[in-house]
Image (cartoon, rainbow, N blue to C red):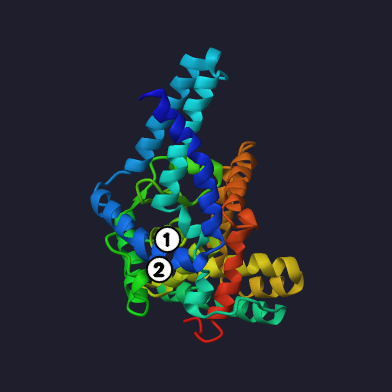
Amino acid sequence: MKDRLKNGIAISLIPQILLVQLLAWNPKFVESYYSKGIFPLISRLYRFLLGWIPFSVGDILYFLLGCWFLYFLYKNWRSLWSKRRLRDLIMVLSVAYFTFHLMWGFNYYRLPISDAFDLEVSFNKEELVQVSGQFAEACNRYQEEINGDSLQPIQLPYTKREIFAIAQTGYKALGEVNPDLDYRPKSIKPSLFSTLLSYMGYGGYLNPFTQEGQVNRKLPSFRLPVVSAHEMAHQVGYSAENEANFLGYLASMHTKDPYAKYSGVTFGLSHCLAQLQAVDSTAYDQVVSTLNPGVKKNFNEAREFWLSYQNPLEPLFQSAFDTFLKANRQEEGMASYSRVVGLMIAYHREEPIH
């Protein structure tokens, strides 16, 4: 590649950043022309091309890129800070920045999902206590329906492929009301790097360059349906984590499968309890005391799973992702995950938990 072209690509990073910032202040434009225009075509095309492949193409690409980057550093460490090498690195960054936003990233700047569902997301403590109690009742009900008793934790009898298919049915049901949420074809896969994801503290991720949803296959089985549905939410164009959490929850609850519904209500309860513990520990203890022993065992299973993968580097990974989220208009960073509580409470003002 000629130096003039390399220089042009590197310099183009500046107008790209300015364009992204301009579009960030025009969510209606992004919603109309990107999130409901260009993006669905790109996403469906890549899911059609790669979804049938049983392993993660994106994971392999990341691995190869990581190897190339290490080789590049090894071969060029002496001249790494030369103008030419810095230009080459900025050029690569420019291409990645352009591709990321074209393939997925502009969805961070679309209209909030509360507009699409006409939800008022503010809530008070009384509403939080009430919905937490409803979630606890639903957890107990599904746990007893599946196991026939209140003592045993839930273990899913499905393969990963079956779990992914069940999660997709939830989006089919949502798509009957909102066609933008009809998720077809699917491209959701167990990550080849599930052990690494566990150490990083992640349940999954979307590869924006291949549109493949990656699920941490080491997760406790009762978490897999809602986590799979969360990654599918990213694939239908919702980048914000609280919104993907909300859609993942809704999709799980719109399936006809009791295991997926249990995954959804335990997910909803876990977020509500985290909020409730922060504002009223007495009410938190009261809700927890109503849970069946089997439900408590599932919560302990999830807690022990993450504890088993704690390591000194995990806070660094979490901090890096926190910075990434804040750079993409999620001002609360990692804390944005918990904002799903407001969406769930607002939704269940009209729709009871069932």
Residue designated by label 2: 259
Q: Residue at x 63, y 44 (%)?
A: 319
- The image position of residue 117, as x and y in percent, is 48, 78
Label 1 element class: loop
The tally of labels here is 2
User: Which quadrant does the N terminus fall into?
Assistant: top left
Q: Residue at x 61, y 41 (%)?
A: 314
| Image side of residue 225 versus residue 347, left or right | left
Say whether residue 153 is visible. no
**Residue count near mark 1 (Cα–Cα under 10 Å), binned few <14, some 14–19, many ≥20:** some
Outermost residue toward the front? 4
Compute the Cα span from label 2 to label 1. 9 Å
The quadrant in which residue 43 appears is: bottom left
Query: Which is nearer the eye, 241 or 201?
Result: 241
Amino acid type of the residue tagged 1 in the rendering: Gln
Q: Using the image, tell me which numbered label, if any, was put on residue 306.
A: none
Sequence-wise first label, 2 or 1: 1
**Residue count near mark 2 (Cα–Cα under 10 Å), binned few <14, some 14–19, many ≥20:** many
Residue designated by label 1: 155
CB under 8 Å between discs 2 and 1: no
Amino acid type of the residue tagged 2 in the rendering: Tyr
| Image side of residue 242 versus residue 319, left or right | left
- The image position of residue 133, as x and y in percent, is 61, 79
Outermost residue toward the bottom? 350
Which of discs 2 and 1 lies nearer the camera? The answer is 2
- The image position of residue 95, as x and y in percent, is 43, 38
